[in-house]
Amino acid sequence: MTTIELSHVSRWYGNVVAINDITMTIGPGVTGLLGPNGAGKSTLLHLAAGFLAPSRGKLTVGGAASWHNPGIYRTVGLVPERDSVYAFLTGEAFVRATAKLHRLADPEAATRRAIGIVEMAGAKDRRIATYSKGMRQRIKVAAALVHDPPVLLLDEPFNGMDPRQRLHMMDLLHRLGEQGRTILFSSHILEEVERLSGTIQVIVAGRLAASGDFRAIRRLMTSRPHVFVVRTSDDRRFGAALIGRPAVSGVEVTGRGLQVRASDYGAFSREVAVLARDQDVRLRELLPADESLESVFAYLVET
Amino acid sequence: MSGVQARVVAGITLRATMGRKRAFLFAIPPLVLILVTVALKLAHPEHASWPVQILGVFGLSVVLPLTALIIGTSVLGAEIDDGSVVHLLATPVSRPLVIAVKWAVACVLTVIFVAVPELLAGLIATGGKLTLGLFAGALAGSVMYNAVFVMISALTTRAIAVGLLYALIWEGVLANLVPGARLLSVGQYSLGIANSIAHNPGLNAALSLPTAVVMGSIVTAAALAIAASRLASFSIKGEPA
């Protein structure tokens, strides 16, 4: 059981603070590092992977500092975000080269095992240049797993994947986490994390904004006030009825329909159709108006 | 040190360097050198002063540094540029070993693309001590220039531009005009070594053999040590928030 420990870690570039005094412990299982672009997720992963020095604070993996310590790569596997692999190698040759760089006793067996885990045996003899985005991501995971590391770090592993590839990768991360490995991945897309239970660390503007069980954070996200745009056959009548409901905290009549602020997302979504039928109003359109990630993160930071 | 790791790094470096489209660039300068030599040989079979000009000035002072620049900045710099070096460095492989192997690959390629053509051109032109001296100078120069260019690739992401400035301004101008700069010039070390065999005043060698060998060894060792320590601190540039 290997943990990643951050103790008051900060990292800045000149005057720009990328990571601001973060303390956390990441243990076995799958942990998602969630935050908008530029929040400092990659910086944090690179700090953990030993490819960036902390400006202040202490970061250890399995008790050993990761900066200036190539020895940690016996414990850590890294899947970088950039899609730069040795494209002229076959998938198998790439994984085998990594096995040899780790000086494994039986590089052939380790290569076969790693390629099996990511289910790439069928394409292992093709050059990486011919791989799709999802296949490249998987062969990078195979190379990162070839020495059977207890810690796996993945930077935006779902970027550019189609839904099927994404599902496959999530399953894989799940399995690896259940084996007792410490899996830390970053993502800026909420839906990606949806299927991965486990722990979530939300990072906004270099700070740890929320942290904990995935379901608890998800509840926070769904119970925040939501804004909807509603268009009906009779906006004023429907607006008057809506404002009478406890789940609605505000209604505004605009040129494009009603702007409805729901204080209880669940109750509002259950009631809105029933209310329209009772009022004999035809619902033309019901759109969430503030589903952007930034609004979700902004809400999480406030609580 | 591990032979397995070294072979993997060497294999990947060789394929990455020679597989790139720019690899055919390596062959152009030595081809020009040999073609010019053949042309001059046909035009002036008996004239004695052009071989030292073309082989010494053009071969040793232009073809050698420029070819070493392209090769020496490719072996490490190309991988740093496209980010693939992360896959190599995310393993416990020793950083000095990575530098040593990449430098060795660059030296072998530069010997093939510069020192050997220089020897061939010399044999076509005159043969004798001048040819032997220039071949020795080119061998030594390959080793020293590549150490400098590998170091530059570890220090900056603009390795080719910085390397070109170094080759043109430091080696090309200052080392010729400022006497003190000659003591710190890889080009002058190569000429010194070449002249110790060739004894040809046309080479304009300023340094004696011991000075050239001692200073050349120090510069090479220092450049490789700096490169290894920079690689040990290799950072992925994060997203500044």
Image (cartoon, coloured by chain):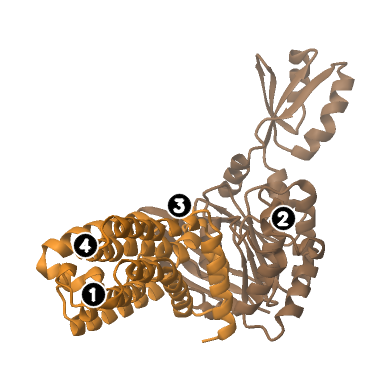
Chain colours: A brown, B orange
Q: How packed is label 2: few (under 14 Cα within 10 Å), some, or many (20 or more)? A: few
| Callout 2 secondary element | helix
**Distance CA(mark 4)–CA(mark 1):** 28 Å
Under mark 4, the amino acid is His
Q: Which mark is residue A216?
A: 2
Horizontal relation, residue A34 to residue B83: left or right: right
Residue A14 appears in view:
no
Return the residue at label 4.
B47
Query: What residue is rendered at 49% in x and 52% in y?
Result: B239
Among the two numbered marks 3 and 1 on one chain, the one whose residue lies closer to the N terminus: 1
Same chain? Circles 2 and 3 = no
Return the residue at label 1.
B189
Query: What residue is rendered at 47% in x and 50% in y?
Result: B241
Under mark 1, the amino acid is Tyr
Nearest-to-viewer mark from 4 and 3: 4
Q: How packed is label 4: few (under 14 Cα within 10 Å), some, or many (20 or more)? A: few
Among the two numbered marks 4 and 1 on one chain, the one whose residue lies closer to the N terminus: 4
**Distance CA(mark 4)–CA(mark 3):** 64 Å
Under mark 3, the amino acid is Pro
Horizontal relation, residue B115 to residue B170: left or right: right
Nearest-to-viewer mark from 4 and 1: 4
At which x and y percent is residue B99?
44, 75
